Amino acid sequence: MAKIGAIEAGGTKMVMAIGDEKSNISEREEIPTTEPKECIPKMVEWFRLRNIDALGIGAFGPTAVNPKDPRFGHILITPKTAWINCDLRGPFLRELNVPVGYDTDVNVACLGEAVFGAAKGLSNVIYVTIGTGIGTGVMIEGNLLHGMLHAEAGHIHVERVPGDDFKCNCPYHDCCLEGMAAGPAIEKRWGKKGYELAGNDKVWDIESSYIAQGVATYILCYSPQKIVLGGGVMKQEQMFPQVRQKTLKLLGGYLVTPELDDIDNYIVPAGCGGDQGILGSLELGRRELEK
Amino acid sequence: MAKIGAIEAGGTKMVMAIGDEKSNISEREEIPTTEPKECIPKMVEWFRLRNIDALGIGAFGPTAVNPKDPRFGHILITPKTAWINCDLRGPFLRELNVPVGYDTDVNVACLGEAVFGAAKGLSNVIYVTIGTGIGTGVMIEGNLLHGMLHAEAGHIHVERVPGDDFKCNCPYHDCCLEGMAAGPAIEKRWGKKGYELAGNDKVWDIESSYIAQGVATYILCYSPQKIVLGGGVMKQEQMFPQVRQKTLKLLGGYLVTPELDDIDNYIVPAGCGGDQGILGSLELGRRELEK
């Protein structure tokens, strides 16, 4: 059995794990995301001691994920200034001398869901994380989407929900999905964190209206076979029926497919119970061994 | 040299062509899109007489383009009622006994542009046609997007341009891109056809504002390496600079890439001069021979 390493590189913490080719995780550790010069050598050392055959990294963005890009494996411009232009993949490649797969955190979560989770076996899958930010992992015809950079579909424009006068929380956009509906927007709008507002129907009515706008646009653009909604905000599972019904209403009957006729099995929670990211990173590492 | 057939199956006319593996077109003919029982046998006969080795079809939608779909090659629900559930691919496969590639008209146009046109050699390309409708052809990591159905990104919601009180022309949506900005919307809004309004700046100011909303959303969702805008409405080439500038404004500096820094070469007219559809169909047919 090969020994595969996985990193879920987040803005707050780094999750490291060791697993086998069948994605059984044998060990896991978390460290805080401090500065790269402190954080990266610690992780390299952790994996060196464990003698891995390959590594998969799912990283916070924006980051260069196209292997043909000279910046491949680098974090790009980010509010976490110490990480700007940081080569996150390179040190592992050089120090551990093993193949290193690299993609965005949401793309690997999408891969995790498509291989092990709610979208198992499907080739066209969208994973949307709604938490401190909103990000989309996208698999099209079996491939994770890269292109110019990677999807940034959390920043699509949405139309203001009538009666909501919240000032968009995104420094770049007047009214984008992330700025109106990510966790920090909920907290600023209502003065409490989302989980403290669980019983307040008005909160989730507005929230699901924004999310449905995003989901409707994603369906029209990506034509996915399944849409998986994850992240901290989606732990408010009472929102699923609302998101589903509002999405159908926005689509207005224009698309007629068996998937939309079975909406409860089309727009779904993650099937990996929070492990979609680390399992996807592991799978990314495993695939490096097949190359 | 193999002899390859191509069909651009549109709602108004059917374009048929014969070409070789290097996409040199030797013959071309058009017939009106009448009823399937009249139209399809005529086309089958035309190709039978020409003894082709393979055929590629780009069809108007919605249509089933996923080879695993039992409806593969069928037109689905369409305002052209005679074509509902029509098996467009089957008769050619059975009568001509050659491999038949099948995709949407906009996907094959995207393929044409990615192989021969403005996006030559790129793997992540969006082709948007803005004409009697608005449709998007999408290539991601070298593959044309299918999934649940195919992209229908012309129907994404847009925000009403201030001062525009036009009632959306789409029977399904309150304010979608196609309903607000396709050719028929221009004609209804202004009482004249687009080409008769070429000198009216206000027309193209409003039009480019809607198109830019679509393009900004496509960039965030698809992260394409190039966006090709085609179709009758985009013959108003004075719109390109406006679409580019308005798109950048909507993105708000959030994405920083070499492509966006060179916007004049990023959002571009078709490079195949109107032949992107038929050349793409030919390429689709050629690829069948490689399978």
Image: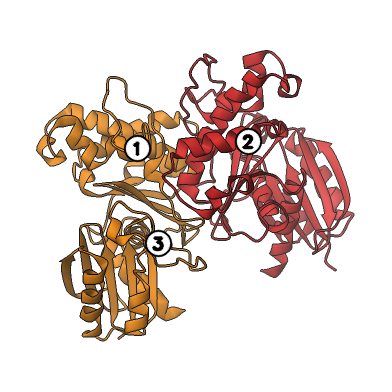
Chain colours: A red, B orange
Where is A168 relative to A78, above or below? Answer: above
Callout 2 amino acid: Pro
Where is B28 relative to A30, above or below? Answer: below
Q: CA distance from mark 2 to mark 1?
A: 27 Å
Give the chain of mark 1: B
Q: Position of residue A164 (x, y in %)?
A: 53, 16
Closer to viewer: mark 2 or mark 1: 2
Camera-nearest residue between A3 and A223? A223
- The residue sitting at 39% across, 65% down in the picture is B74
Callout 1 amino acid: Leu
Element at badge 2?
A: helix
Give the chain of mark 2: A
Q: Which residue is mark 2?
A: A241
Q: Position of residue B156 (x, y in %)?
A: 41, 39
Q: CA distance from mark 3 to mark 1?
A: 29 Å
Q: CA distance from mark 3 to mark 2?
A: 43 Å
In the picture, the quarter occupied by the N terminus of chain A is: bottom right
